Image (cartoon, grey):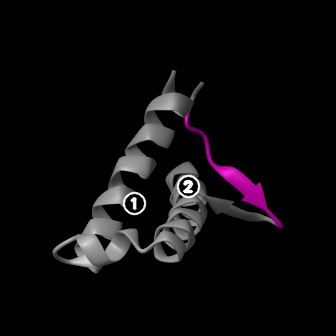
C-alpha cells in the first residue's frame, strides 16, 4: 500500500497522523486494562512504560500498513 494523503472535508491529512490516533486508542485501552489489574504499579516509571508501549504499537501499525 502506498502512503497517500487522506482527504477529510477538503483538508489533506498525512497518513501517519491517522496511524498515531489509532495507536493512541489502542494504548488507552491497554492502559485501562493494566490499571484495572494493577500492572502499572509494578513498573519503575508508568508514564515512560506507556510511552514505550505507544511507540511499539505505532511502529507495528506502520509495519502492517506498509506491507
Identify the element where label 1 is drawn.
helix
Q: At 55% from the left edge and 67% from the top edge, which residue is drawn?
A: 33
Name the spot of residue 62 as percent of width and height, x first: 46, 39
Numbered badge on residue 25: none
Name the spot of residue 45 as percent of width and height, x first: 20, 77
Q: Locate residue 51 relative to residue 22 in the image: left or right.
A: left
Q: Nearer the viewer, residue 35 or 18?
A: 35
Name the residue that disc number 2 marks: 14
Pair 2/1: label in front:
1
Q: Nearer the viewer, residue 65 or 43?
A: 43
Residue at the left extreme? Answer: 44
Q: Is residue 29 above or below residue 44?
A: above
Circle 2 residues within 10 Å: few <14, some 14–19, many ≥20: few
Q: Nearer the viewer, residue 55 or 6?
A: 55
Name the spot of residue 7 as percent of width and height, x first: 75, 55
Name the spot of residue 14 as percent of width and height, x first: 55, 55
Identify the element where label 2 is drawn.
loop
* Quadrant in which the N terminus is drawn: top right
Name the residue that disc number 1 marks: 54
Res. 32 image quadrant: bottom right
Q: At 43% from the left edge and 50% from the top edge, which residue is drawn?
A: 58
Res. 13 image quadrant: bottom right
Whole-number angstrom distance, CA of label 2 to CA of label 1: 19 Å
Q: Is residue 3 above or below residue 44?
A: above
Q: Locate residue 58 relative to residue 8 in the image: left or right.
A: left
Q: At 28% from the left edge and 60% from the top edge, which residue is drawn?
A: 52
Q: Which residues are magenta?
A: 3-9
Asked if residue 7 is among those painted magenta in the image, a careful observer would answer yes
Q: At 25% from the left edge and 71% from the top edge, which residue is drawn?
A: 42
Circle 1 residues within 10 Å: few <14, some 14–19, many ≥20: many
Amino acid at each position: 500500500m502506498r502512503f497517500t494523503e487522506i482527504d477529510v472535508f477538503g483538508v489533506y491529512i498525512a497518513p501517519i497522523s491517522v496511524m498515531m490516533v489509532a495507536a493512541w486508542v489502542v494504548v488507552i485501552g491497554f492502559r485501562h486494562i493494566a490499571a484495572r489489574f494493577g500492572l502499572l504499579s509494578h513498573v519503575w516509571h508508568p508514564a515512560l512504560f506507556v510511552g514505550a508501549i505507544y511507540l511499539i504499537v505505532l511502529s507495528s501499525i506502520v509495519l502492517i500498513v506498509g506491507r
